[in-house]
Amino acid sequence: MTQDVAAEAARRRTFAVISHPDAGKSTLTEALALHASAIAEAGSVHGKGSRRGVVSDWLAMEQARGISITSAALQFTLEDVVLNLLDTPGHADFSEDTYRVLSAVDCAVMLLDAAKGLEPQTLKLFEACRARRTPVITVINKWDRPGQEPLALLDEIEQRLGIVPTPLNWPVGTAGDFRGVMDPATGGMTQFTRTPGGATVAHREALDAEEADRRHGLDWERASEELELLSSSGQTHDQDAFLAARTTPVLFTAAVLNYGVAELLDAVTRLAPAPGAWADVAGRTRPVDAAFSGFVFKVQTGMDPAHRDRVAFMRVCSGRFERGTVLTHSGTGRPFQTKYAQSVFGRERETIDEAFPGDVVGLVNAHTLHVGDTLHSSPPVTYPPLPRFEPEHFAVIRPRDSARAKQFRRGIQLLDQEGVVQVLVSDRRGAQAPVLAAVGPMQFEVATHRLEHEFGAQTILEPLSYSVARRTTSRAAPAVDTTQGAEVLERSDGTLLALFVSRWRMGTVESNLPAGSLLPMFGAPDQDVA
Ligand code: G4P
């Protein structure tokens, strides 16, 4: 088959949902897939409560905790548009994982709980999108429950995120009494009607302004007035401003009832950008219809306990991926066989024979691939390494039984390559006692669990009192390392990290060092830079 690669790229939308835990990401994912008819009935995507689990429950620990640590990609087609929805871990401790997923998308959907507004994890992830200038569509969810005033929510977005919210629709009925949405484009309303249990697509009825007024009276008038207020202050959708990440289109949903979900799908297909040229390490761009290239944004081991396999998830950046072709690994220059290529969503796996820019390919048993690696066909290309979040938790890890030292080392190396935790070493501490650095303490739990169950190495973990990390230079390192309340260690990518017990301690150390001795972590959100 000879499809036109540029045309295939143009009909793809690759996006992820970012949210604080419990805002309704899993519910929305199900609802999106349901609308796109990828699944027959809501409740079969994520495994929570009584719902049947298909995705993200590979690790027994995940199941026990009811959280989703691992992530994958769901592909569905809506009319002629192919949507790639990349799943992100639900727990805040895995924001580093989420950050990597965000490096592989062209658009993000920021999901807020109408009662809670912006929450800490939403803010962090939004900053990650801002750093990459990723366009963001905002969804205010749980409108079927009492919540804040819509204007207050928009104000909060503008004030705290510094981005102009531009409503694509507006709720009719206060939070807790969600009747439908006003559509500024038509001046009419879409009225939603509940279906039992929200298990099927909600019934939608289009009303003109007159009928909406007749049925919803004061609620309709209020919605019209509020929307008029916003449009008179210029808060209307502008595609260029959205693509430049200066504005964020806003929609209102009740994902659990499937209200407003069709409108969101429509917004993603119409507004989210199609995959475009990807910039390499030198800043040169490779067009989507150039020869094949892709980069690994996630590596996952042990997804199938029966097979102990290792899957590298690659985003296609340019060209056509054809299973069976031999690609080149840009880091080593070695050939890479693509015989085992799959789409992986939870336990569902299917062989992928071809893929196009924006798609995600799971490369099975990809033992030579690490997070951030580029694969390409000729001419060569290398994409930039993936940015890392600033760790805030540190612990020394040792094998409990020195006879298992080899297994321990192998396990640590693998977890490091997968990006489960950052691994830091120093001559002073020695190779048998590396320091693990994490964004959230649950990363330690995953690391120790996997070392024990996959490598047979029980471990002892000793938390350290450091809470801040900065990159440092080899010139400044000796001075920092001999200071009380600070220490310098090397990360496996060669970066020197200075750890401090507090920001205050860091400030006093920094004041005695030449300018530029302590640097923010590459790609860390602005707010983290003290
Ligand atoms: P997450 O992945 O972001 O962590 O959130 P998830 O979808 O699991 O949703 C968290 C809770 O919020 C769930 O309730 C879910 O049913 C509920 N929820 C999601 N969207 C909406 C909505 O639009 N309206 C209302 N009222 N609730 C919503 P739970 O009690 O924790 O779980 P469950 O037993 O309902 O599955």
Image (tube, rainbow, N blue to C red):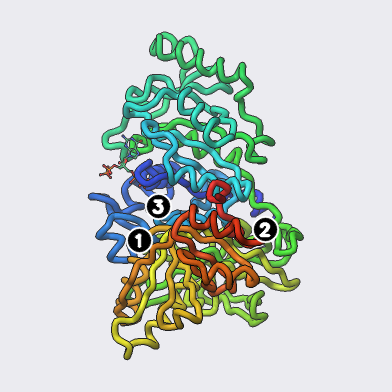
Q: Position of residue 127 (x, y in %)?
A: 55, 46
- Nearest to N terminus: mark 3 or mark 1: 3
The answer to whether mark 2 is within 8 Å of ligand 1 is no
* Label 3: few (<14), some (14–19) or many (≥20) C-alpha neighbours in 10 Å: many
Identify the residue under disc 2. 515
Which is in the foreground here, disc 2 or disc 3? 2
User: Which residue is farthest left?
Assistant: 50
Looking at the rendered structure, the kind of residue marked 2 is: Ala
Which mark, by number, is residue 442?
Answer: 1
Look at the image and tell me whether residue 239 can be seen. yes
Relative depth, front residue between 495 and 412: 495
- For the residues labelled 2 and 3, say whether their Cβ atoms are less than 8 Å apart: no
What is the quadrant of residue 378 in the picture? bottom right
Distance between the alpha carbons at the discs numbered 1 and 2: 35 Å
Q: Is residue 158 left or right of residue 439?
A: right
Q: Check the image and report above or below for 238 versus 490.
A: above
Give the structural element (helix, strand or loop) at label 1.
Answer: helix
Give the structural element (helix, strand or loop) at label 2.
Answer: loop
Residue for point 45% across, 54% down:
87
Which is in the foreground here, disc 1 or disc 2? 2
Looking at the rendered structure, the kind of residue marked 1 is: Met
Q: Check the image and report above or below for 473 versus 218.
A: below
| Quarter of the rendered image showing ligand 1 | top left
- Nearest to N terminus: mark 2 or mark 3: 3
Looking at the rendered structure, the kind of residue marked 3 is: Ala
Give the structural element (helix, strand or loop) at label 3.
Answer: helix
- For the residues labelled 1 and 2, say whether their Cβ atoms are less than 8 Å apart: no
Q: Position of residue 285 (x, y in %)?
A: 74, 58
Identify the residue under disc 3. 92
Relative depth, front residue between 164 and 484: 484
